[in-house]
Amino acid sequence: MHASLVIPTLALLPPPLLAGEGWGGVKSLAGTPDKSASFDAVVATTRREGTPSFLTVAEAIAAAPAEGTKPFRILITRGRWHEKLVIDKPHIHLVGEDRAGSVLTYDAAAGMARPDGEPWGTWGCASVTVRAPDFRASNLTIENVFDYVGNLATPKFEPIGPNGAQAVALMLDAGSERAVFDGVDLSGHQDTLFADAGRSFFRDCRIAGSVDFVFGGGNALFERCELHSRFRPGKERQGYVAVPCTPSAQAYGLTFVRCRLTRDADIPDGTVALGRAWRPGRMFPDGKYGDPDAVGAAIYLDCWMDAHIDARGWDEMAYTARDGRRVMLRPGDARLFEHGSSGSGAHRGESRRLLTRERAALYSRERVLDGWAPA
């Protein structure tokens, strides 16, 4: 594929907020849910009369039918719910009482030990892991509060992978399909959102992190979301936003539509990459090496970018080849494109490959989600 000659608009200021939008251009959904809405369970610090109430989110999830066929709606009241959650039942819907005040939180990192003494690893450290279809979350926050910055200064464990500081807030694992996130804040540093399986839809969300903070091999569509880069002290390369490992036969990977790329005030201009393609290590009959079938796909469509985005756009990323050598996967060897970028972080150049208008039209919601129409 060759770069188009279409030149993105270089607006210096973000577009004005739409009606009903709050800070960062993200629609504010904070406040109490619809009073007329019915819930199957309530999570609160004290037992309540009426609707079944629980003292933990895990207890409320356990009360849902194992093979439910309709939504099991759980109201998460204001509070910080320090639990490591696995969603393994279909049709679980988590609804926050307050977007900023209803918080699902945990603090595990890849290099930390599980109860059995083995490290959690990237695939096991998530605060919330989804392994069942038709999950939905709205009007709440999911975070991993592992002290990434403190660990930079004083590492707390043996490295797992590059550093052991991978600390996932949300993972969409095998079994996840048709997951919806509406007005949700996701917060972490390295590896905040691991969208690794199924189709998922993120609308009016805020995702904050630094290194590879939106990554994975799933088909995830983001509409009107804020992708916020967090400061890393002492790092010349401040971070990477989108890091896909999309299977080669999968047409869509990480698709960002009308999103905003913002930053902490301490992050200098030109120090964050739009992303890089990831070729994760897999076990094969002849050994473990970077999966040659991972040809990452990440697309930015009509997104506004602040000046922290590097003019080169994308970075290369190392992986282990079949013969054991460490080699680099170059951006041009993956599916990394943009169209209609604006803001002071939008640049033109050979390294910023652009989709034509005709190809950009192939990224409608209906096409990306293969006919699934989330409400």
Image (tube, rainbow, N blue to C red):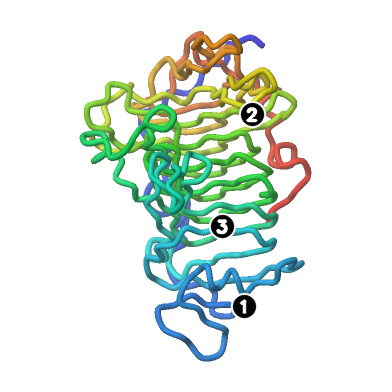
Residue 344: x and y in percent read 37, 25
The residue singled out by tag 2 in the image is: 246
Q: Name the mark on residue 40.
A: 1
State the residue at coordinates (46%, 28%). Answer: 342
Does residue 26 appear in this view?
no
Instruction: Give the structural element (helix, strand or loop) at label 2.
Output: loop
| Front-most of residues 3 and 280 | 280
Quadrant in which residue 308 is drawn: top left
Residue at the (66%, 27%) spot, across then down: 360
Q: Which mark is residue 86?
A: 3
Alpha-carbon span between mark 2 and mark 1: 37 Å
Judged from the image, the secondary structure of the residue bearing numbered disc 3 is: strand
Q: Is residue 59 left or right of residue 175?
A: left
- Ranked by sequence position, the earlier of labels 3 and 1 is 1
- Residue at position x 60%, y 53% in the image: 130
Q: Amino acid at mark 2?
A: Thr
Label 3 to label 1: alpha-carbon separation:
19 Å
Q: Quadrant of residue 161?
A: top left
Q: Are marks 3 and 1 in contact (CB under 8 Å)?
A: no
Q: Earlier in the sequence, mark 2 or mark 1?
A: 1
Q: Residue at x 47, y 10 (%)?
A: 349
Mark 1 Cα-neighbour bin, 10 Å: few <14, some 14–19, many ≥20: some
Label count reads: 3
